[in-house]
Amino acid sequence: MSQMTAATTPKGERRRAALVAAAGELLVEGGFESVRHRAVAHRAHIPLAATTYYFESLGDLLSNAVAYAGELDLAAVRGRVEAVSRRKRGDSALAKLLTSVFFACDTAAERGALVSRYERMVLCTRDPELTRLQAQVRNVLAELHVEVLTRSGRRATGPGVDRLMAIEDGAVLAALTTHGADVPRAVREALGTVVDDLAPLHP
Amino acid sequence: MSQMTAATTPKGERRRAALVAAAGELLVEGGFESVRHRAVAHRAHIPLAATTYYFESLGDLLSNAVAYAGELDLAAVRGRVEAVSRRKRGDSALAKLLTSVFFACDTAAERGALVSRYERMVLCTRDPELTRLQAQVRNVLAELHVEVLTRSGRRATGPGVDRLMAIEDGAVLAALTTHGADVPRAVREALGTVVDDLAPLHP
Amino acid sequence: MSQMTAATTPKGERRRAALVAAAGELLVEGGFESVRHRAVAHRAHIPLAATTYYFESLGDLLSNAVAYAGELDLAAVRGRVEAVSRRKRGDSALAKLLTSVFFACDTAAERGALVSRYERMVLCTRDPELTRLQAQVRNVLAELHVEVLTRSGRRATGPGVDRLMAIEDGAVLAALTTHGADVPRAVREALGTVVDDLAPLHP
Amino acid sequence: MSQMTAATTPKGERRRAALVAAAGELLVEGGFESVRHRAVAHRAHIPLAATTYYFESLGDLLSNAVAYAGELDLAAVRGRVEAVSRRKRGDSALAKLLTSVFFACDTAAERGALVSRYERMVLCTRDPELTRLQAQVRNVLAELHVEVLTRSGRRATGPGVDRLMAIEDGAVLAALTTHGADVPRAVREALGTVVDDLAPLHP
DNA sequence: TATGAATGAGTCTTCATTCAT
DNA sequence: GATGAATGAAGACTCATTCAT
């Protein structure tokens, strides 16, 4: 990757991170085409030339931005997962919980982050490196599903979670396609019909 | 009045269509950012200035390209739907059928079209006009699902189809996220667990 | 001028005039660079190609527009001159009258027309044909000054009028150069010091 | 911060200046519409992209060009003012002097500069920033009038100078409007009738 | 006689990237 | 190691004018 782009200095490392963060924010806010050298440098308050000094190309910077955005997204979700209390939940309550944890959409920023999540999924398709990154995010998301399910007193198997997530993603996609649709609502309703298939942990 | 964007002549209509087709192809092949005046003009073997003569702006041309790509996609699916014979099908056979009809992925072109379908879904989010377009495509896709289900001797209700499509879309998204994943296979497997919920037409 | 551009038809004549009027309006509203084939055609509700059919070139159309704008300006001034009552006027009253007649600036349209008057004066410099046109306008303006002076009981000689107009124009130029300046006020004040040199008609 | 439009280097400063000079020359020679990125770059023997590197927009470059042209004009006038000997002058001699100092028109270049001076005055009207610039030039011109008057043994008050300049400007405008008119001659004659109003310094 | 269609040339501006320092 | 400076290529779009019909 970085043959001569040392940046092993503490300072270099810090600036690199600042650049990635700036790029990540732009990515989430305005989509892939918002990530430009100039825009990133400006937002990070770092000289333009640093963007090509620390990253081989715009694509390289973008990769990092995608990873960063994914981690940011994951961190937010993780935070909400931690807050989930351990207690048995009925089907309807569980659907609601899953929605609020994985598809928070109250603020504009949250909605933006959600849209960005799906943009990243789809647009990574044309780049193997990004695909790998995206797969990792998906795995973590799956683990977090297991965690929430467990805390809610349900047994969660691999295929079961896959199916759950497919339903969720499909519902989101459908909602995004409909102008002004209420994404969390759509997810909750879609979930309503599947959650009951999940066996309780101790029957 | 309409001193431009006329294209009322047969010839004008033809050129306009050629431009849209070229833009649509570029969209499918290389994504949204591949649709540029220059690229479209070059592919259509039409002078650069004609691209702004026939379309008010690049956005306008892009809208048309999205619509075109959607119709192309739909036409292909429709063709496969027409070929579906009327006969009762077991769960496994139905899952296979749905997959082959809606998620054909044998040639590179077919896989490209499939990816593009999902790109369009997600990227239209930032533009209301495109969202509207995409919603229409989704509706047709839903109708075609009903048709295939009916031909297979199943009763298809609105929510049932929504759920079916959500599963499919979620599975595709998951597969696209996984490098080298077999999309049709993923869909078929995901479908395997839902199809049996669909009641037969005459039990 | 128009070797093959017949347009001797009544209809042709009418359309030509409509085009000139549209171009003239644009000229007054937005300056020389606002006069474009497209803009003129659009405003006149006449096909684009007619603009080059009835006029050899954009320059030709522009000449006509300048003449039209000049006539329009003159017509407005003339109208105000007609309304001037015959009566002896003191110096101050005369300065006020001249200002209101020749430098009406109450509405935005009037101010625009005034600015345009001076734009035309200056920009015609680079084109002999336009210069000739502008000279004519100036002569009429001089005659109208004589008329107003006469109606006010003053004797008006050629040099006297020239001097009067020079003062006016100079004051306008100075006012235009000052942001937010009150043009009529500037003219009135400048006039205050000269008008008294004009001998009364019957001493 | 200032990742562009830097030009803090001597070299950068030089190139920036070259661009402004080129734009200024074009402005004087061909009017406002002659100032284009391409034309400026070509004349300055500098790459096209440099024009937008050193100036945020064409408007920005144009502002600089207007300022430059104004300074050039002022410098020339100042030069002629410096050369004015201190000595009492009769009315006719003073009129001649003022004309030769402020309205030099012997060479084609001088005449061009003169025309440009008035173009700038009028065309700046539609832009507040340019208006401000033009007001400054006017002030300096007024000061220089005072200087010449003083050197000629006359007392010069503010209103007196304003009136003088108005007469001059009005005369120039009238002359410019007349094809082939002798601008200096017109100014001299117009001045002939005003200069005598200027009281001598030591009566 | 008109005009819809068409386009080459040119408009301003942005951008990823290189390079001298 | 860092970066200000620089630029070729391309971006979207406008325009005066021509021409076939």
Image (cartoon, coloured by chain):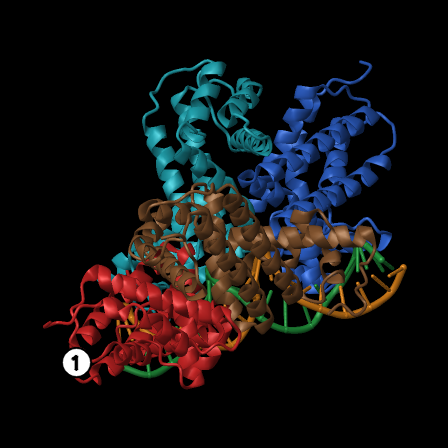
Chain colours: A cyan, B blue, C brown, D red, E green, F orange
- Image quadrant assignment for residue D23: bottom left
Which residue appears at 81% of the width and 26% of the height?
B152
Which residue appears at 42% of the width and 15% of the height?
A89
How far from the left and from the top, in percent, is residue B96? Answer: 74, 36
- The correct choice, above or below, for A31 with respect to D36 in the image is above
Q: Amino acid type of disc 1?
A: Lys
Chain name for mark 1: D
Q: Which residue is mark 1?
A: D88
Callout 1 environment at 10 Å: few (<14), some (14 to 19), or many (20+)?
some
**Residue D22 visible in this rendered orientation of the protein:** no
Which residue appears at 21% of the width and 83% of the height?
D84
- The correct choice, above or below, for C91 with respect to A58 in the image is above
How far from the left and from the top, in percent, is residue F19? Answer: 82, 68
Front-lying residue, B47 or B68:
B47
Placement of the N terminus of chain C among the 4 image quadrants: bottom right
**Residue A129 visible in this rendered orientation of the protein:** yes
